[in-house]
Amino acid sequence: MTQSVDRDANRALRARFDEVHDQYERLRSGLDELRHRLAAVEVTATSDDGHIAATVGPRGQLVRLVLDPRVHRTHDTEALAARITGTVQRAAARATTVVRELVAGYLPPGSGAVDFLDGGDFGALLRRGDAALREEAARGA
């Protein structure tokens, strides 16, 4: 009887290992492609009046700012600065969404890494591992 239980446990463990290994291989083989796709990310946002265009890279860093000559008509530099800042922030938020979607296509569902990208929540990176450890401890008890 114990041999049968041991064989069943070994089969389940092997199946789980194969699943995790397949996920790892998929991630590993796609890593170069993902790296290139992420490096190519550029997102542009335009101000509501169309006078400001901000382009950011994958980390939300400003790579290009285009100001229509009409922006010089206003002498309210604080308002202009606020419009530029808002336009850059919208572009950065869109870039975050693009990066999140790219990365999510290479990670297993519920991995926590995508949640980390969304909000910088380090706990999200640890939750899945913590849950697996609790599950394993419960089985051993």
Image (cartoon, grey):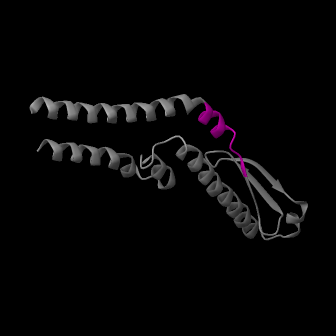
Q: Nearer the viewer, residue 103 or 62?
A: 103
The x, y position of residue 13, in whole percent, is 27, 33
- Is residue 20 found left or right of 27 in the rendered image? left
User: Magenta includes 104?
Assistant: no
Kindly report the secondary structure that dominates the magenta region of the rendered protein: helix
Instruction: Give the residue displayed 59% in from the left and 29% down from the top.
Output: 32
| Quarter containing the N terminus | top left
| Quarter containing the C terminus | top left
The x, y position of residue 8, in whole percent, is 21, 34
The x, y position of residue 67, in whole percent, is 83, 57
- Is residue 46 found left or right of 85 in the rendered image? right
Q: Is residue 117 above or below residue 37?
A: below
Q: Which residues are magenta?
A: 33-43
Q: Is residue 134 above or below residue 16?
A: below
Instruction: Give the residue displayed 34% in from the left and 32% down from the top.
Output: 17
- Is residue 67 found left or right of 18 in the rendered image? right
Q: Is residue 73 above or below residue 58?
A: below
Q: Nearer the viewer, residue 29 or 70?
A: 29
Q: Is residue 23 above or below residue 45?
A: above
Instruction: Give the residue displayed 36% in from the left and 51% down from the top.
Output: 123
- Residue 70, quarter of the rendered image: bottom right
Looking at the rendered structure, the number of numbered marks drawn on it comes to 0
Instruction: Give the residue displayed 65% in from the left and 38% down from the top.
Output: 37
